[in-house]
Amino acid sequence: MTLRHKSAIRQHRRSLRRRAVNQRNKSLMKTLIKKFRETINSGNREAALALLPQMFKAIDKTVAKGAIKKNTGSRYKSRLSKQVQNLPAKAS
């Protein structure tokens, strides 16, 4: 693709920077969600509850940057917190 206009060249550079930021935020979010799901599958409720605020922060940051939509972020948070609530508490 050959860009000829100065404004098109600048816009292309801008889109590449924005794409990199979006990919970085989405990757961090997905990594934390994957780690969270592994913790849930192991049945460790305390560790999952400890990861919850960190994961919510990453989801909220990704929403704020515009990489994912607000409802998508809310859906992730709702489903993942519901999974934690369904884990049995340790009987002491």
Image: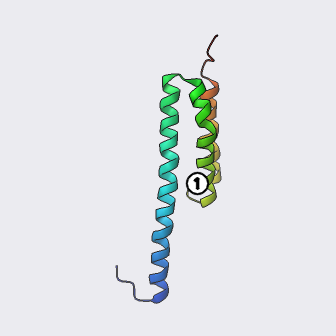
Quarter the N terminus occupies: bottom left
Looking at the image, which residue is at 48% across and 69% down? Answer: 17
Quarter the C terminus occupies: top right
Neighbours of disc 1 within 10 Å: few (<14), some (14-19), many (20+): many
Q: Quadrant of residue 16?
A: bottom left
Looking at the image, which residue is at 61% across and 37% down? Answer: 52
- Percent across and percent down for residue 75 are 62, 42
Looking at the image, which residue is at 48% across and 82% down? Answer: 10
- Which residue in the structure is indicated by mark 1? 62
Q: Quadrant of residue 83?
A: top right
Q: Is residue 49 left or right of residue 20?
A: right
| Residue 49 in the image: above or below residue 56 | above
Residue 85, visible in the rendered structure: yes
Q: Is residue 23 left or right of residue 69?
A: left
Residue 72, visible in the rendered structure: no
Q: Is residue 2 left or right of residue 45?
A: left
Q: Amino acid at mark 1?
A: Thr
For this rendering, which residue is in front, 42 or 86? 42
**Total residue callouts:** 1
